[in-house]
Image: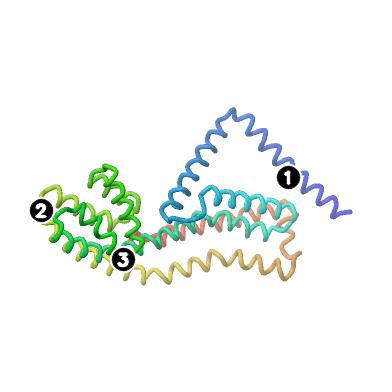
Amino acid sequence: MTELWSQLLRWASLSSFVLSAGVIWWASGGVLRCALSRRWTAHLRAVRHQVAFLRLAVPAERLLQLQAGACGAALLGLVASLWWLSLIFVGAALSVMPALLHRRDKRVLALEEQLDGWLQTLSGLLHSTGSLGEALEESIGLTPAPLAEELEVTARQLRLGSSLEESLDMLAERVGSRPLRSALGALKVSARSGGELRSALTDSAAVLREMARLEGVLRTRTAEARSQGVVLALMPLALAAGLSWMDPNFLRPLIDSTSGHLLLAAVCGMWLTGLVWMRRILDVDF
C-alpha cells in the first residue's frame, strides 16, 4: 500500500510539473516559444554544419530525434525510480554534440598534418602550370583525404564562378584551422602582390612544420592532465551506478525525500561547476 501511494505521489508530481510547464508556456505569450524556437534552430544549424563537414551518412535530423528519444527515456526512468538509467540516457543525449566536435577536431588535425605535403606539391605544380587555380585543381589527385575532399569543394566553387580569393576564404572558414588560415593568407597576399608563389609556399611549409612540432610538444605535456580530468569527471557517475547496482536501496533517500532532492541538486551543481572550471583550465589553445 505504501508503495502504491509512493507511485501515485510520483505521478502526481510529474503531472503537476507538466501542467505548470504548460501554464508557463501559455502565459509567456509566445516569448518563450520564440526563444526556444531560435535555440532549436541554432542547435539544428550547428548539428547540420558538423554533419556536413564530417560527411556523415546519418542526417542531422536523425541525430536530433535520437537526442529527443534519449531525453524521453530519461524522463521515464525517473518516473520508474531508475535514476541511474536516466543518467545514462541523459549522458547519451548530451554526448551527441561533443562527439561530433571530437570527430571534427580529429578531422581538422589530420587535415593540418597534410598541409606541409600539399604546399610542397602545390609549389611543384606551379612550376609547370603557372596558374594557382590550375595547380590547386591538379593537386587534388595527388592529395589524400580529408584535405582532398575540402580541395574538391574549393575547385567546384571555382568552376561555378567564384574568385580564387573567395574560394580560399570559404575553405578557411569551413575548416576553421588556424594553420590552414595562415597558409592560405600568405598564399593570397603573395598572389595579390605579385610575389614569388613558390618561395611563399616553401616558407609557409617550413613555418607549418615548426608550428606542428611545438603543438606536438604542448599536446604531450597536457595529455596526462586531460586524461585525469576525464577520469575525475566520470568517477561520480560510475560510483553512483556501482552503489545502485550493489544495493538498490542505498541511494533511495536521495530520491524519496525533499532533503535528498536538495542535496542531490547541490551535488550536481557542484559537479557541473567543477567540470566547467576543469575544462577552462585544460582548454589550451593550440
| Quadrant into which the N terminus falls | bottom right
Residue drawn at (30%, 65%) of the image: 114
Residue nearest the observer in this picture, 196 or 131: 131
Q: Which amino acid does label 1 sit on?
A: Leu
Q: Which amino acid does label 3 sit on?
A: Glu
> Residue 195: which numbered mark, if any?
2
Residue nearest the observer in this picture, 273 or 79: 79
Q: Mark 3 points at which residue?
A: 113
Which of the two labelled residues, at mark 3 and mark 2, occupies the earlier sequence position? 3
| Picture coordinates of residue 286, whole percent (x, y) | 33, 61
Residue drawn at (32%, 54%) of the image: 152
> Residue 14: which numbered mark, if any?
1
Dividing the picture into quadrants, the one containing residue 242 is bottom right
| Picture coordinates of residue 17, whole percent (x, y) | 70, 41
Label 3 – label 2 distance at C-alpha: 26 Å
Query: What number of labels is visible?
Result: 3
Residue nearest the observer in this picture, 222 or 185: 185
